[in-house]
Amino acid sequence: MELISFFSTIFISCVIISMTIFSVYIGFGPSSSKLRDPFEEHED
């Protein structure tokens, strides 16, 4: 039972870390210049 909980903890941790790294890459990577800022578009 300990082995299953250990591997599931490692798996969930890897998924969370990879989603975080992917989000940072999308936000600040080379394709970030194509993203639009809705707050700048509706500034008064």
Image (cartoon, helix red, strand yellow):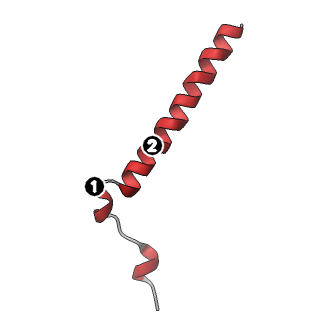
What is the C-alpha distance between the residues marked 2 and 1? Answer: 14 Å
Taking the spot 46% from the left edge, 77% from the top edge, the residue there is 39
Instruction: Name the residue located 38 percent from the left edge and 57 percent from the top edge.
Output: 28
* In this view, 36 is above or below 8: below
Q: Position of residue 11 (x, y in %)?
A: 55, 23
In this orientation, which residue lies closer to the viewer: 36 or 24? 24
Residue 35, located in which quarter of the rendered image?
bottom left
Which mark is first along the chain, 1 or 2? 2
Q: Which mark is residue 40?
A: none
Residue situated furthest right in the rendering? 1
Quadrant for the N terminus, please.
top right
Mark 1 is on which residue type?
Pro
Secondary structure beneath label 1: helix
Total number of numbered labels? Answer: 2
Residue drawn at (60%, 16%), measured in percent from left and top? 7
Locate residue 15 relative to residue 7 in the image: left or right. left
Q: Is residue 23 above or below residue 11?
A: below
Q: Which residue is mark 2?
A: 21
- Name the kind of residue labelled 2 in the image: Ile
Graded by Cα atoms within 10 Å as few (under 14), some (14 to 19) or many (20 or more), the crowding at tag 1 reads few
Residue at 58% over, 30% down: 13
- Reply above or below: 28 against 38: above
The label shown at residue 30 is 1
Asked whether the residues under the numbered discs 2 and 1 touch, taking CB atoms below 8 Å apart as contact, a structural biologist would say no
Pick the residue in front: 36 or 29: 29
Q: Residue 23, position in %: x, y? A: 44, 49
Say few, some or many: other residues with alpha carbon within 10 Å of mark 2 (under 14 / 14 to 19 / 20 or more): few
What x and y, as percent, mark residue 37? Answer: 40, 72
Give the quarter of the image for residue 9: top right
SS for callout 2? helix
Q: From the viewer's perspective, is residue 43 above or below residue 6?
A: below
